Amino acid sequence: MAAPARPRAGTFPQDAPARARPRACSYDELEDQLEELQLDHEEITNDLVDIQAEIRAAKIEAQELRMRLQTTERKNAPAAKVPDQMQTGAAGNPRAEELRRIFQWLADKAVLEEPRAFNANSDLIMGSQQVHLRNIVQWRLTGDLRLSVPEELAAEISNMLSAAKADGKFFSEAKATSIINEWVLTTSELLSETPTGVTLLTHSVSQRSCLVANFPPPPGPPPRQVETLDGVTVGDRVEVNFKEQWFTGTVKGIEESGVAAIHCDVDPPEVMLKASLHFLRKPSNNNSPPQEQAGIQAESPQQQEQEKNAFPDAGQASL
C-alpha cells in the first residue's frame, strides 16, 4: 500500500484548521480603552484621597484620646504637689479659689529676676479662642514651663507676683474675689506633640492672654562678638563678594563664628551685609570711589530686617 503524499512546503492539508490572525483595533476602540483607563485611574486616586483622610482623622482621634488620658491622670494625681495652704479657701467660690491657687503658684515658681523679652511671633488655638503671641516678657517657672506675658501686661503681672512673694497672704480670699473680675482662667490641651497642658489667663478688659506652657522657647543668646578674627579687624576697609560682584565697605562687627557685618558704601546707613570672612578681601584700590550700584535693596527671607546674608556653602552672598 502506497504511503500518502506529503504536502508541499508552504501548503497545508485540506483538513488542517486555518490560523486566526489578530484583528487590529481601530482608533476609536483605542480611544475608548484609554478613556476607560483614565476613569479607573481617577477612581483609584479618589479612593486613595479618602483613605488618607481617614488616616488623618484616626490620628487626630488617637491624639484626642491621649490628651484625655493625660488630663485624667493629672486630675487623679496625688495632691501632694500642691502646697497645703493652696488647698484651702473659698469653698463657695471655686472659680476665685482656682485663680488664687494659680496666681500663688506662679508667684512661688516664677524667677522674676530673669525676664526675657522677645517677639514670639506665634499663634495658638484653644477651642474657640485664638491667641496671638507677639512681643512678650517671659519668666522661667519649674522644669521647662514658662510664664509668657504680653509686653503691655508685664509690669502689672511682675508687681503682683513680687508682692505675693513678699507677702504669703497677698492672695487672700478677698483678693481672689477681686481677681476673678479681672481674669479668666482656661486650661486645655493642644492638639499637637506638646507634652504638657496649656493654661491661659485672659485679662477681661484688654482680652490679652498670659500663657503657662513649655513654649514658645526664648531665643538663644546673641553671637559673641570679637574685635579681630583671621586677619580681619572691626573698622577695616574691605571688599565683599555679593552675587559675584565686589563691593567696597567697612567692617562694623565680627562674630566669633566667622561672620562679619559690613556696611557697603553703596547702601543706606541702616543696611548691613552679613557675610562669611571667606567672602572678604582687601580693597584693590583704597582710593577708588565706591562702585555705583543703583537699585540694590536688602531683603532677607530669614531675618526680614533689611539684612543681606552671605555664606560659604551657598557659593555667594544673597540679599
Image (cartoon, grey):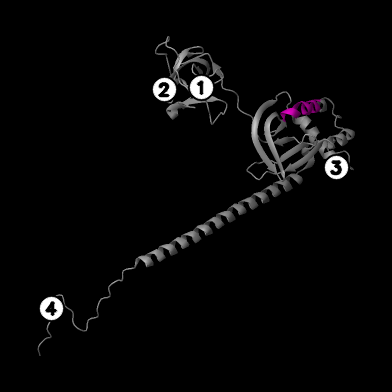
Mark 2 is on which residue type?
Gln
Instruction: Of the two numbered discs 2 and 4 on the same chain, state the one appearing first in sequence.
Output: 4
Q: Nearer the viewer, mark 3 or mark 4?
A: 4
Q: CA distance from mark 1 to mark 2?
A: 13 Å
Q: Which mark is residue 94?
A: 3
Q: CA distance from mark 3 to mark 2?
A: 69 Å
Q: Residue furthest front?
A: 294
Name the one closer to the observer, 18 or 312: 18
- Which residue shows up at 41% across the image and 62% down it? 34
Residue 141 image-quadrant placement:
top right
Residue extent of the magenta highlight:
150-162
Instruction: Of the two numbered discs 3 and 4 on the same chain, state the one appearing first in sequence.
Output: 4
Read off the residue under disc 2: 245
Instruction: Of the two numbered discs 3 and 2 on the same chain, state the one appearing first in sequence.
Output: 3
What percent of the width, then of the height, locates residue 22?
30, 71
Q: Residue furthest top?
A: 287
Left or right? Give the position of 237 relative to 24. Answer: right
Left or right? Give the position of 228 relative to 8. Answer: right
What percent of the width, then of the height, locates residue 45?
50, 57
Q: Nearer the viewer, mark 1 or mark 2?
A: 2
Tag 3's secondary structure?
helix
Q: CA distance from mark 1 to mark 4?
A: 93 Å
Residue 303 belongs to the span the image colors magenta:
no
Read off the residue under disc 1: 273
Instruction: Of the two numbered discs 1 and 2 on the same chain, state the one appearing first in sequence.
Output: 2
What percent of the width, then of the height, locates residue 315?
42, 28
Q: Which mark is residue 8?
A: 4
Q: Which mark is residue 85?
A: none
Q: CA distance from mark 2 to mark 4?
A: 86 Å
